[in-house]
Structure formats: structure tokens, C-alpha cells
């Protein structure tokens, strides 16, 4: 079965960077885009961006273009998202998610990684 | 960007009642070449990740109970729960995948009386 296992919670200082991971299993990693979604406490969902694991190609929500960097390691079927120049506005749960078979709906979700930005 | 608007923002119902919630998009999500609506619905229970319920506006994901029904076309969509159970306590989100950036509605919070 498809599983997305995300890394643990992070407490980071303002101005720092953090790198989150998402290890995929149960399917061919390079066959599906990986997406990242942000959810601030008590708030809704925002799509950050996506990466094609087969060639590393990315697409971003304009809002996050200078904030997030997406990469993959095909050898370990792991996707990464680095967030830079962190502020309190970046405190949120970040989800990795995989699309469905034939469309960009989010069929599978990781458990989420809580990032807290605090001095 | 396509703006997704959901209403109501919250509602409280009794177990066994029928519930309908609305999702409206700022432009049509109907793709003329295949006559498909590029809209999905998700359920997020407290403390959990979102779960896919519906895609193509009305196709139920495998394993989703048939009390959940998606309908609508173009810019107006509805999620109906035919007979609410206590376990349906959650926030429900719609999402368009018609064009970049993929966007979500603000959610409808379902509470059980």
C-alpha cells in the first residue's frame, strides 16, 4: 500500500532554514509527482509546489517560489522540501502528498511535519 | 488564480440528518474536451491529515462510504452526506485541479449536536 512517511517536528529559529523529508513506499516513486501542502494552525490548506521525481522538474505557487526548494533522492524514494529565511508565518504543518492515477487530486497524504519558528 | 469559496463555514447537525455544503469556483472547472469537472473533496478529522473523498466532482474514492456524494458542474458544487454519523465530525475542503496554482476552499466545519 502507498505510504508517505514524513520526518519529525522541527523547532527552528527565525531566519534559519529547515529541510523536511517524505519517504515514499508502496509504488514506483518516479511515476507520480510529489506535492507539498501547508496548513497553518486552525487554518486551511495551501499548495506550495510539486516535483516530478523522474527528472526533478518543479512547479511552484508563486507565493512560495522564494521560500521553498524541492528535491528528490530517487535511490531512497525520498522527497525533500527546504524552507528558507523562516519567520513566524512559516510555523505550520507541512504535508507531502501524492496525486491520484489520472489527475491532480491528492490521493495519499503523509502524516505531516510540524514546523515551529521561535527564538 | 482560481478562488474557491465554501459555505457555510460551519454547521451543526444531529446524527442521522442529511447535510449539504457548497463550493463555488471563480471560474468554470469543466474542461470542454472531456466534459470532466476538475474538483475534489477532502475530509480532515481533528489531528489527522486530509483524506480524499471525491474526485472529478462526483467519483467516490475507493473505500469512501456511499453516504458521501459529490455533485455539480461548472462553478457550483455540492458535497452531500445523506445520513450523518458521529465519526463525520471534520472539516471538509474542496480543491480545484483545473489550473495552476492548485487551490483549496476555506473549508466547512461539520459539528455534531
Image (cartoon, coloured by chain):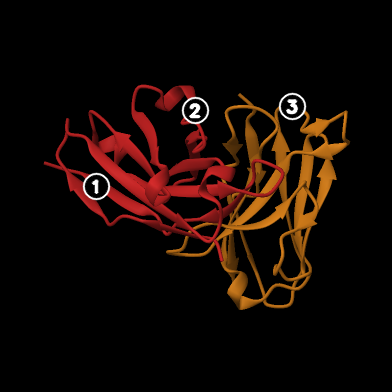
* Residue at left offset 70%, top offset 69%: B63
| Residue position marked by numbered label 2 in the rendering | A57
Residue B92 visible at all: yes
Vertically, is B4 above or below B82? above
- What is the drawing colour of chain A? red
Q: Which mark is residue A116?
A: 1
Chain for disc number 2: A
Identify the element where label 2 is drawn. Answer: loop
* Residue at left offset 82%, top offset 31%: B31
- What is the drawing colour of chain B? orange
Q: Which mark is residue B27?
A: 3
Rounded to the nearest whole Å, what is the CA distance between mark 2 and mark 1? 28 Å
Residue A60 screen position, x and y as percent: 48, 27
Vertically, is A5 above or below A54? below
For this rendering, which residue is in front, A111 or B19?
A111
Residue B23 relative to residue A6: left or right:
right
Amino acid at each position: 500500500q502507498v505510504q508517505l512517511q514524513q520526518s519529525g517536528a522541527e523547532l527552528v529559529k527565525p531566519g534559519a532554514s529547515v529541510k523536511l523529508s517524505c519517504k515514499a513506499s508502496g509504488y514506483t516513486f518516479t511515476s507520480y509527482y510529489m506535492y507539498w501542502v501547508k496548513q497553518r494552525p486552525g487554518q486551511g490548506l495551501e499548495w506550495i509546489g510539486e516535483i516530478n521525481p523522474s527528472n526533478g522538474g518543479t512547479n511552484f505557487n508563486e507565493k512560495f517560489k522564494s521560500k521553498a526548494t524541492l528535491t528528490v533522492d530517487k535511490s531512497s524514494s525520498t522527497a525533500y522540501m527546504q524552507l528558507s529565511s523562516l519567520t513566524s508565518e512559516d510555523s505550520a504543518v507541512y504535508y507531502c502528498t501524492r496525486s491520484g492515477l489520472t489527475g491532480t487530486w491528492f490521493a495519499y497524504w503523509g502524516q505531516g511535519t510540524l514546523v515551529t519558528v521561535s527564538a | 488564480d482560481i478562488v474557491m469559496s465554501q459555505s457555510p463555514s460551519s454547521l451543526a447537525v444531529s446524527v442521522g440528518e442529511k447535510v449539504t455544503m457548497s463550493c463555488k469556483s471563480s471560474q468554470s472547472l469543466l474542461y470542454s474536451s472531456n466534459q470532466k469537472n476538475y474538483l475534489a473533496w477532502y475530509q480532515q478529522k481533528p489531528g489527522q491529515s486530509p483524506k480524499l473523498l471525491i474526485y472529478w466532482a462526483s467519483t467516490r474514492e475507493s473505500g469512501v462510504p456511499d453516504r458521501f456524494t459529490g455533485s455539480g458542474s461548472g462553478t457550483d458544487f455540492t458535497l452531500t452526506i445523506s445520513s450523518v454519523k458521529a465519526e463525520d465530525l471534520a472539516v471538509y475542503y474542496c480543491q480545484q485541479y483545473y489550473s495552476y496554482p492548485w487551490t483549496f476552499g476555506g473549508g466547512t466545519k461539520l459539528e455534531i449536536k
